[in-house]
Amino acid sequence: MATQTRSPITPAWRSASAIPLRPAADDDAGRDTVTGRIPLADPRPSALHSAFRPSAFAGEIVPFRVTAFREGHDRIGVHLRLIAPDGGESLHRLSPAENGLDHWTTQVGLLDRGVWRFRFEAHGDDYATWRHAAELKIAAGVDVAVMREIGAALFERAEAEKDRPAAERRVLHERARELRDPGLDDLAALAIVGDEVLGGFFRDRPVVSLTTVGDAQEILVERERAGVGAWYEFFPRSEGATRGDDGTIVSGTFRTAAARLPEVAAMGFDVLYLPPIHPIGRTNRKGPDNSLVAGPDDPGSPWAIGGADGGHDTVHPDLGTLADFRAFVAAAEAVGVEVALDLALQASPDHPWVAEHPEWFTTLPDGTIAFAENPPKKYQDIYPVNFDNDPDGIRAEVLRIVRHWIAQGVRVFRVDNPHTKPLQFWEWLIRTVTDESPDVVFLAEAFTRPAPMQALAQAGFQQSYTYFTWRNNKAELEEFLSEIAHSTADFLRPNLFVNTPDILTEYLQFGGRPAYRIRAAIAATAAPTYGVYAGYELYENVARPGSEENIDNEKYEYKIRDWAAAEANGDSLAPYLRRLNEIRRTHPALRQLRNLTIHWSDDDAVLVYAKHLDAALSPEGVSDTVIVVANVDPHSVRETTVHLDTRVWGVEPGAPFAVEDLVTGQSWTWTDHDFVRLDAFAEPVHILHVKGLA
């Protein structure tokens, strides 16, 4: 896998815990047990299945954690040894977690793409052990001479290490001499024991014994787009579609859809997702709202792929030519937008595959081919692929198709229903494609059970749809956000789409305009990747009766919208989406996944969370903290007190600090307990930037 070329003096990581590199130590030589002298267990990051690697994106701040302990009261230290894709090594000090459960942690920003190797190294920390004992015993007048001699000998051991700076070695020599001086009183000896300058010497270059080296681990770091992006979905056939005097609609094309690209970019979206752009079958074509009868001018579902004009490697003739598609991709790139293409491995009854490779489908006892089902839904216009009759043939064909679209400039694929295909197929395909083209990103559209959703992510999908659309009240959101930020973040990157053509939740149907504002704000700030389906900014909230689908669903018909008129009349959410994306680009804390902390409020409808990035880990070198306070009840005005653990961003409890609302521009002085009033019909969400101590 390709890596970035870096200056020899520029590290491939960001870390506040980096210490001078020292040679790797040997593990306890010749041990005949699984456990080392100092036990190391549960190394993180990790995937659920040991056969898969955890992953991150370039620039992501990754928490490294391991459980380490030893018998008795002697102190230990733990280091993380990182080996970058280019072979460069670095060493990072871990700190014990405050929970007292023997967890040791540090955070490192991994900048270079490729496979990183890491391992944890634990050791007896002779200085920390001596300092702890000496502080207690000298103050109590117990074993004072012994403690002073142990300290002096320890300083001499450190002085003998040739990799220590000369000035440091001189100080160690002098302090050893002072500890052995009979004229030094106990108070002065305690001052040496507590000297923070000496403590710094030993934190960076500890005097170690009983070293244990953990097993080698790997983490795959992919390009930033694999984990950061604002997605926008539209149907190119609707963009630029026109209605004739007789009521018939002429399809939009890649050329007319390209006219919409500058506005998509102006709203701050950097990925444009297109549903399938291929020919659509005629047999069993669906009519409006998924009806079984289609008129002669009904365009059909784009997911019913294939017809007389071709299959998955062809564009629908109504949209233009392959050259027109390449021009569309180039036009998107020119305004800073990547095109994501749908990869839907299924076929209409008219697809060339059906005649050429009937073995790729399931034949029923009556001789017919089984159509797709998701009970109680039926898709009479689609045949699902059978991956078991000719697995080698299917693999070769799908790989050919993906390579074809990569050759047209596509680097992002949104995969339709991957959980209905064999997991081993995806593992093979994604590994094969990314070995050839490391920039390619696959998004799994798998609204399914946790086990298959997580398995798809471990097998290689860089992004995953989630249950976000159905998590709407405070308790649900707290649990969900904690899970994606901490429980599964080592291998699953969530893409928080607020809506899709198939998902218009009751929250949006009946929550009015406040619901649209609330959901967009949470999606845009809680995860570094989120998405919006066109029409969201127009508050399209009418569902087909008895369903979660938009009425007049764009899957089955053209949708002609007047974007400019809606914004001119103040009937568009586009300005708010534009502001959310501006905030995301300005605040690096929002471009991270694992830094989210849940805070508290006295109201069961007011959600509070924060995202913090330390200055040492920030690309700008400046600390960044954003607090989000959201009234998740779109029908009410809420007044309550929020309670913040301000230690997360380095402010002592009770200390005042300044905050600015990044949407309204208002400023306040806050502490760890603050009154808020959130009117769902005006501004239901505070997005607050911590400006510093007041």
Image (cartoon, helix red, strand yellow):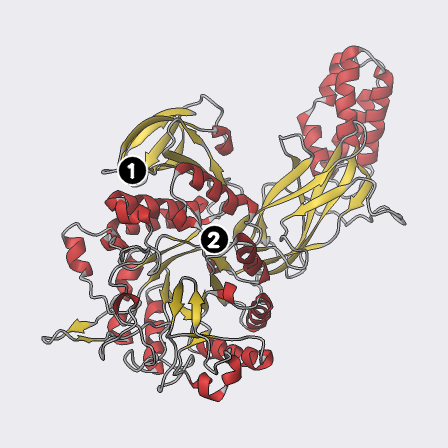
- Mark 1 nearby-residue class (10 Å; few <14, some 14–19, many ≥20): many
Q: Amino acid at mark 1?
A: Pro
Q: In front here: 209 or 312?
A: 312
Q: Amino acid at mark 2?
A: Pro
Kindly state the secondary structure of the residue where label 2 is placed.
Answer: loop
| Residue 270 in which image quadrant | bottom left
Taking 365 as reference, is 424 above or below it? above
Q: Position of residue 198 (x, y in %)?
A: 71, 29
Taking 300 as reference, is 593 above or below it? above
| Residue 655 in which image quadrant | top left
Residue 34, label in figure: none
- Mark 2 nearby-residue class (10 Å; few <14, some 14–19, many ≥20): many
Kindly state the secondary structure of the residue where label 1 is placed.
Answer: loop
| Residue position marked by numbered label 2 in the rendering | 494
Observer able to see residue 65: yes
Q: In front here: 200 or 244?
A: 244
Mark 1–mark 2 distance (CA, rounded to whole Å): 24 Å
Give the residue drawn at x 25%, y 52%.
Answer: 541
Q: Position of residue 462 (x, y in %)?
A: 52, 60
Taking 261 as reference, is 575 above or below it? above
Give the residue drawn at x 48%, y 62%.
Answer: 444
| Residue position marked by numbered label 1 in the rendering | 684
The C terminus: image quadrant: top left
Taking 198 as reference, is 27 above or below it? below
